[in-house]
Image: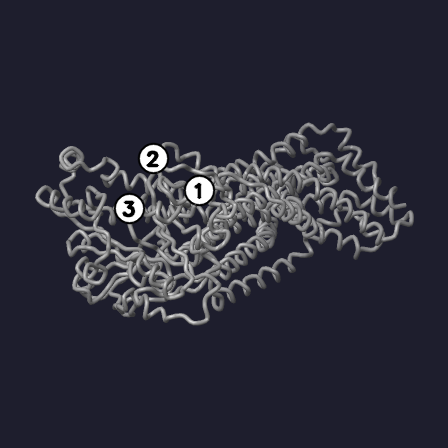
């Protein structure tokens, strides 16, 4: 009985291979986009974990300088003599062949286990690691780029890309920081009695172990954005699966009736249906995982460039296949199939024996559920309101966004039903009345595809509006911030002093750009000193400022902070902020700082030197007439001897910044295109499936004198009209999505809020593409209808329908 029932069920797919293709393709595409995004996220997190593990950043407390980003090595020696079990670390950026790498120096004899890729006991010649020229460990993809380096490079799979590890003495030489340390790792085994830290090293402070690396915390917002896009794409794909399963159940009502009439128990029928769907889910999931791996491999280089450009995070550009990723992808494919089929299976369970034999039972049941859609949409709107009023953080922001998007999608069939009813009431003539009535009858079968199209269009409009608004704001902001004609960097503080003396008589102004890296309010931060010059007063973009803000900055009675720091710590003009060295400063203004993930504080150059004399004095902005800038650049190279890569003009910085910006949104643009493509495929599959069961509705109209060609044209017109109504509904939904992304999600994710601009031409272009996709999707079913043999239409009057 079980085997016979199973073969009876799957015989449907042999007779309807196109429907089988629709189901498998829809689920495979949904799984591909979701699993591809998850593969990218898993690779990024693996890189963060490798970096944190290799540097001991997560597990151990650390001693760091209260001021600046380094301190004298003598403090380490004093602590060791006093019984403190600590291990020194020096960190800096090393430029090799035009690329910047993160170099970390450690002491292999005191470093915690696992920090050095090769344990000292396993190394036959440990002296080679810490005696000149030393050794450098690097990830395989990084090691291949270090050709020509005097220090030998060893390959280690335990290190993150872009990270170099060496002995601390070798690192001090390579970074030109003799006798300097960045931090001390406090080892777990400490003596019971220790001299107080304040007596030995009062300039150091203890930082507790972190729950995760700073980079991982910063980039989590970007990865969550990718997850949201993957989830949206998966949801759109499930619309295809849900529609294909529902219509397949409608077409198999006679099979269900016959099996039940022959004595097959209901629980056996449901179990066989579940096994059938499980087999299809495993097949489609396997195909989707292969496609997802290809998508992830294609997009990962751009994601890595984005994380590197926005956050300085080094992520491997090659993809590793993980068993957990494969298992999670297959599980989501099975779960998605179960969700998509739950409604259809429930109707099989609840309907009496002969009810499935009634024509178009599923379609009419869809019409009866409009009030359920209204109730669900109202509940989601209430959830969105609660998230808006009560929620905080990025999760609440995405709950708000997702609830409103799904509510809008659920309300689309209700809105279309009302509009079609209004059109039917205004129609004159039998053909027009039939057209609108027939369209309303088709609506339940097409509603899922139209909802998928609405979500895809709204996502495209919302994201493109956000990206375009960001581009306009970002370019305008660059024009304000990058006003100096040249930016130059000296090799040392001594050369910096000589460089300033060289430039002063040759330029209109020489503006120091001196800063130190530290922590402010518990966040990684940069403290910049700026000169009291009209360049800043006239061009620096302030979001809010106290009276005489720049005068207070110059005198040291106030500071400016960037928007990221202001929003993350709920600080604004009039508040006070604690800075390193026991300085509590008043906030005189808040400025926009797009693209910077870190906190930033702006103070006058004189207060900077007075409070942080150890700051490096190597970078300058040069104001000069634009036509004289090339000549001054040549003089810096030829007369002063400054390397060419230490002189950057304004245009080059803008071009580099915009290049990073464009790569940042390559991934989201690709996901938008894929999501819209899936929505178009949903329309195609729905129309094809509906075409197979619409002959009983079309045959009487054909018999009454309407030609097959005319019927096909009406089918095209119907698809175009429904797509147009969906586009018109998607525009306000997309604009609401854009506002939420700019004003809510962007603030929670990145720390800055952007103004919203409108781009009507983008809507027109996207609408045209959507209508073209709808026409192309309807063209095949319409062509099949136009070429249907008259004998097939006449058979309608000879069967049970």
Q: Which residue is mark 1?
A: 137
Q: Nearer the viewer, mark 2 or mark 1?
A: 1
Q: Earlier in the sequence, mark 2 or mark 3?
A: 2
Residue 762 x, y percent position in the rendering: 42, 42
Is 619 placed left or right of 595 in the picture? left
Residue 433 visible in the current orientation: no
Q: Which residue is mark 2?
A: 97
> In percent of the image, x 24 and y 46: which residue is there?
482
Q: Earlier in the sequence, mark 2 or mark 1?
A: 2
> In percent of the image, x 45 and y 40: which residue is there?
302
Q: Quadrant of residue 10?
A: top right
Residue 344 x, y percent position in the rendering: 73, 51
Is 440 placed left or right of 131 in the picture? right
Q: Mark 1: give few (<14), some (14-19) or many (20+) Cα within 10 Å.
A: many
Please say if 197 is above or below 491: below
> In percent of the image, x 47 and y 62: which residue is there?
393
Q: Which residue is mark 3?
A: 176
> In percent of the image, x 49 and y 49: which residue is there?
50
């Amino acid at each position: 009985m079980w085997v016979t029932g199973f073969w009876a069920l799957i015989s449907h797919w042999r007779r309807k291979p196109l429907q089988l293709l629709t189901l498998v393709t829809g689920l495979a595409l949904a799984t591909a986009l979701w699993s591809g995004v998850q593969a990218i996220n898993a690779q990024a997190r693996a890189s963060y974990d490798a970096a944190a593990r290799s540097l001991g950043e997560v597990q151990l407390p650390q001693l760091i300088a209260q001021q600046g980003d380094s301190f004298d090595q003598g403090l380490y020696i004093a602590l060791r003599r006093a019984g403190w079990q600590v291990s020194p670390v020096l960190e800096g950026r090393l430029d090799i062949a035009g690329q910047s790498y993160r170099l970390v120096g450690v002491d292999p004899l005191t470093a915690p286990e696992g920090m050095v890729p090769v344990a000292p006991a396993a190394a036959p010649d440990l002296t080679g690691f810490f005696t000149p020229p030393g050794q450098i460990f690097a990830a395989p993809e990084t090691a291949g780029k270090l050709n020509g380096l005097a220090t030998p490079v060893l390959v280690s799979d335990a290190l993150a890309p872009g990270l170099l590890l060496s002995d601390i003495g070798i690192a001090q030489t390579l970074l030109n920081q003799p006798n300097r340390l960045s931090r001390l790792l406090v080892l777990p085994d400490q003596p019971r009695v220790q001299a107080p830290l304040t007596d030995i090293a009062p300039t150091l402070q203890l930082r507790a172990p972190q729950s995760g690396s700073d980079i991982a915390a910063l980039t989590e917002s970007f990865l969550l954005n990718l997850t949201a896009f993957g989830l949206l794409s998966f949801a759109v794909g499930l619309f295809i699966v849900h529609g294909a399963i529902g219509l397949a159940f409608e077409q198999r009502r006679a099979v269900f009736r016959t099996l039940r009439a022959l004595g097959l128990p209901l629980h056996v029928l449901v179990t066989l249906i579940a096994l059938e769907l499980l087999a299809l889910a495993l097949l489609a999931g396997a195909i989707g995982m292969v496609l997802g791996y290809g998508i992830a491999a294609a997009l990962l280089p751009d994601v890595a460039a984005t994380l590197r450009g926005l956050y300085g995070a080094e992520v491997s550009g090659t993809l590793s296949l993980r068993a957990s990723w494969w298992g999670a992808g297959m599980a989501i494919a099975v779960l998605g199939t179960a969700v998509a089929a739950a409604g259809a299976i429930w109707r099989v369970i609840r309907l009496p024996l002969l009810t499935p034999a009634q024509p178009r039972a599923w379609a009419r049941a869809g019409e009866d559920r409009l009030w359920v859609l209204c109730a669900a949409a109202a509940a989601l709107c209430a959830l969105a309101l609660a998230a808006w009023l009560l929620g905080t953080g990025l999760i609440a922001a995405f709950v708000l966004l997702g609830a409103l998007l799904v509510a809008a999608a659920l309300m689309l069939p209700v809105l279309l039903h009302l509009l079609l009813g209004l059109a039917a009431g205004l129609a004159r003539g039998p053909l027009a009345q039939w057209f609108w009535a027939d369209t309303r009858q088709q609506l339940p079968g097409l509603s899922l595809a139209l909802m998928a199209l609405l979500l895809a269009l709204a996502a495209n409009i919302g994201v493109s509006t956000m990206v375009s608004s960001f581009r306009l704001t970002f370019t305008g902001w660059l024009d304000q911030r990058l006003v100096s004609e040249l930016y130059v960097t000296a090799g040392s503080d001594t050369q910096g002093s000589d460089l300033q003396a060289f430039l002063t008589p040759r330029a209109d102004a020489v503006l120091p750009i001196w800063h130190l890296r530290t922590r402010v309010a518990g966040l990684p931060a940069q403290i910049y000193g700026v000169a009291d010059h009209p360049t800043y007063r006239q061009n620096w973009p302030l979001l809010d400022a106290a009276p005489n803000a720049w005068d207070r900055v110059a005198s040291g009675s106030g500071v400016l902070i960037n928007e990221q720091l202001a929003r993350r710590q709920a600080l604004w003009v009039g508040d006070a902020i604690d800075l390193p060295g026991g300085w509590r400063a008043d906030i005189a203004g808040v400025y926009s700082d797009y693209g910077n993930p870190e906190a930033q504080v702006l103070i006058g150059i004189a207060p900077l030197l007075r409070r942080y004399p150890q700051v490096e004095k190597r970078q300058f902005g040069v104001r000069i007439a634009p036509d004289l800038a090339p000549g001054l650049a040549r003089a810096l190279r030829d007369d002063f001897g400054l390397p060419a890569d230490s002189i950057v003009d304004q245009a080059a910085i803008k071009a580099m910044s915009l290049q990073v910006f464009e790569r940042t949104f390559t991934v989201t643009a690709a996901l938008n295109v894929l999501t819209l493509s899936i929505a178009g495929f949903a329309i195609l599959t729905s129309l094809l499936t509906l075409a197979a069961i619409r002959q009983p509705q079309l045959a009487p109209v054909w018999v009454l004198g309407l030609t097959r060609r005319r019927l096909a044209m009406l089918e095209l017109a119907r698809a175009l009209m429904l797509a147009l109504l969906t586009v018109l509904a998607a525009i306000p939904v997309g604009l609401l999505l854009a506002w939420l992304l700019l004003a809510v999600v962007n603030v929670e994710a990145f720390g800055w809020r952007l103004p919203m601009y409108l781009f009507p031409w983008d809507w027109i272009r996207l609408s045209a593409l959507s209508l073209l996709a709808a026409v192309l999707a309807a063209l095949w079913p319409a062509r099949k209808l136009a070429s249907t043999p008259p004998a097939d239409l006449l058979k309608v009057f000879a069967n049970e329908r």
